[in-house]
Image (spheres, coloured by chain):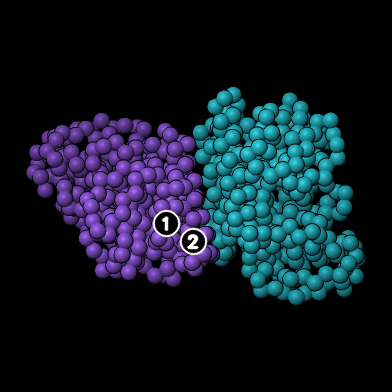
Chain colours: A purple, B cyan
Amino acid sequence: MTRILVTGAGGFVGQALVRRLLAGVDALPLTQLVAVDLALDLPAHPRLTQLRGSVADDAVRAQALAAPPDVVFHLAAITSGQAEREFELGLTVNLRATLALFEDLRRQHAATGRTPRLVQTSSIGVFGLPLPPHIDDATPIVPTMSYGAHKRMLEILLADYSRRGWIDGRSPRLPSVVARPGLPNGALSAFASDLIRELAAGRSYESPVDAEGTLWLLSLPACVEALIHAACIDGERLPATRAWTLPSLHVSVAEVVAALMRRFGVEVSQRLSYAPDPAIIPQFARWPSVDTALARSLGFVPDPSLDVLIERCLPGAA
Amino acid sequence: MTRILVTGAGGFVGQALVRRLLAGVDALPLTQLVAVDLALDLPAHPRLTQLRGSVADDAVRAQALAAPPDVVFHLAAITSGQAEREFELGLTVNLRATLALFEDLRRQHAATGRTPRLVQTSSIGVFGLPLPPHIDDATPIVPTMSYGAHKRMLEILLADYSRRGWIDGRSPRLPSVVARPGLPNGALSAFASDLIRELAAGRSYESPVDAEGTLWLLSLPACVEALIHAACIDGERLPATRAWTLPSLHVSVAEVVAALMRRFGVEVSQRLSYAPDPAIIPQFARWPSVDTALARSLGFVPDPSLDVLIERCLPGAA
């Protein structure tokens, strides 16, 4: 039986992950799930403990770890746009809180001998600008924004804790996960979600990215399955880096629009206009081809097609 | 005129750097030099303030930064072997103290608008095992020990502070700097220093590395000049990563011994024996060829020859 801790459990991915875990995953038979976030909107469940607070708060972490977890999904983060605007907050939540969490788990390991599995959501934001023409598992990683810098630092740190046997770490790098709700969450890449969500809902949308823009997309349900799979893999099969880029669909805006037209009718294109934003396009809409051989060898899969991805983005799909 | 702060000023490199700066560097006309370390053994000098304490101590940093520095040489570190044995100490000094120093300087920048230059000593320890057959400026960086992990994290962090204009950072990666005194400093690569120092002093030496062992060597005086040069380069000329591997001599143990024989006579070889240590050789004595094109384009140079390097290693040379 498994005690699971989820940080960032109130977020877009966190909420969906908690609901999926509570619904029952054969490989992770649940004893107790502790969900931590500043704000939580999860339904009551006999196996669920909801802890409202920040993972950066020592007292909150102490409560969250009171019963040593077997598996930790560490999703709490200040994402790209917000981490860029609010540097100190990003540093505190992304870097300091994670370091503190790792240290808590190291001390727990020293006391109990247990080595929990920990899945932390890294990001394709670790690849900085200018992006190389092709990305694979050997591409040098040179972040160029604070968010990507923090994520790369944490990948390196978790690999060291894993090498020492204190934490059995895993750092899957998430691409754009769609379709986020329309609330501003600070992710500069949110336009991919906006595009799909607004057009699917029958509303008009002005895209800040031209039709030639290219993206790496993963649907929310596929992302949740990837995180669960990341927790279930035998640590011995993982590379020493403990980090890998998740498979996703590499598609153009035009291809996404075509898929939306197949699902919702040709009038979708009439509700779409383009107002390309030079501040967004270079970093968030010119993603090169990617070879995720390592992740595929570990059993990770992208959505099977854009049509399936669109279907999975509809309300209630996660 | 220049206010300079040196952390780790009591160490092997730090002491030599402080003496060199006090002797007068045209490009860095000295107003005041603040030297910080737990232990200091520097001569009194009208421009020198000696602060005994740890850079990890908030009060010590506050004193060290009371007059905002123009240039910081951040050398304080727990080196490879000790950081591996004493994880928490390494984390505190290498990672947390540096993060705190960067944050102090960021706040000072917000208050004064000044952007100090900061040279932090990174290390070829950022390259993890197995080492690739050739290393250059595009080699993926995958540290495999805690020391290298911390150093790589700090390179990434300093690049981010530099991009934002808060610190004008520089992270030169030091190879084996020779010849350290015979005190245990925790550096697993110390055998290169032991080899040169003991044989040069007319003593016997049992080498834990075979004659085919290969090393990257830099003499202490050349290292000091490299650090000063790193502080003097115009920030606009630096790459966004703010990090580079310093040029050094790529030599075999046999070549070092041959140079020692040229300087001290053939009897040197009679005082040398080999007892290869399989724990040391893979990580510290199989360094591949290296191309430091970036550093050379910035004006960094290695020692001109092994014979000059040996000469520079003799007592009093720094």
Which residue is identified by label 2? A108
Please name whichever residue, A244 or B110, is drawn nearer the observer in this view of the structure. Answer: B110
Question: At label 1, which amino acid type do we have?
Answer: Leu
Please give the chain letter of the residue carrying mark 1: A
Is the residue under label 1 in contact with that under label 2 (CB below 8 Å)?
Answer: yes
| Numbered label tally | 2
Q: Is residue B273 above or below residue A30?
A: below
Q: Which residue is mark 1?
A: A65
Q: Nearer the viewer, residue B179 or B32?
A: B32
Q: Where is residue B287 shown, x and y percent of the image?
A: 65, 62
Query: For the residue labelled by badge 2, is the local secondary structure a helix, a strand or a loop?
Result: helix
**Apparent side of residue A230 relative to residue B302 in the rendered image (left or right):** left
Disc with the residue nearer the chain's start (2 vs 1): 1
Q: Secondary structure at mark 1?
A: loop
Query: Marks 2 and 1, Cα distance to the nearest angstrom?
Result: 9 Å
Locate residue A17 relative to residue B254 in the image: left or right: left
- Classed neighbour count for the residue bearing mark 2: other residues with Cα under 10 Å, few (<14), some (14–19), many (≥20): some
Evaluate whether residue A77 shows in this view. no
Disc 2 residue type (three-letter): Gln
Q: Nearer the viewer, residue A33 or B95?
A: A33
Image side of residue A213 versus residue A283, left or right? left
The percent coordinates of residue B241 (x first, y second) are 54, 43
Query: At 49% across and 66% down in the image, what residue appears?
Result: A112
User: Which residue is painted at 59% across and 29% down in the image?
Assistant: B108
